[in-house]
Image (cartoon, helix red, strand yellow):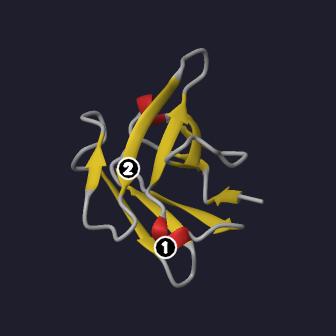
Amino acid sequence: EVRLEESGGGLVQPGESLTLACAASGFTFSRRAMKWVRQAPGKGLELVSSISSSALVINYAPSVKGRFTASRDNDKKILYLQMNNLRVEDTATYYCATADDIRGQGTQVTVSS
């Protein structure tokens, strides 16, 4: 059974940083592309970043490019999202997901002054 468990969310002020983590189990993590998606209140899902199985190819949404960095540790089966210079509009529930859209329960990120 595929399991994804996100952590690291919280309440921060604009300009601050957070690092999200996603612990994966139940599948061969090292062979699967992964992604981070988010859902802001009242809005649909937005793809934040995708990362290939080897992390050689990483893509970002224009809204986060230059501020967010996705990475992965295939030995530990953990996916990361380093988020710097957070903005109010980054407020959302963040999910890690497999390429075929299996998601975890999400972690809430709130950016507010």
Measuring 39% from the left and 66% from the top, which residue is drawn there?
71
Left or right of residue 103: residue 68: left
Label 1, on which residue?
A: 30
Callout 2: helix, strand or loop? strand
Q: Residue at x 57, y 43 (%)?
A: 94
Q: Quadrant of the N terminus?
A: bottom right
- Decide which of tag 2 and tag 1 comes sooner along the chain: 1
Report the residue marked by disc 2.
50
- In percent of the image, x 33 and y 67: which residue is there? 55
* Identity, as a three-letter code, of the amino acid under mark 1: Ser
Query: Residue 15: where, in percent of width, then height?
Result: 36, 47
Hey, what amino acid is under mark 2? Answer: Ser
* Dot 2 crowding, Cα within 10 Å, few <14, some 14–19, many 20+: many
Residue 18, numbered label: none
**Residue that sits furthest to the right in the current view:** 1
The residue depicted at 55 percent of the width and 69 percent of the height is: 29
- Identify whether 82 is placed above or below 89: below
Q: Nearer the viewer, residue 93 or 110?
A: 93
| Helix, strand or loop status at disc 1 | helix
Task: Tell which of 44 and 77 is nearer to you.
Answer: 77
Residue 38's place in the image compared with 71, above or below, is above
Percent x, y of residue 113:
49, 36
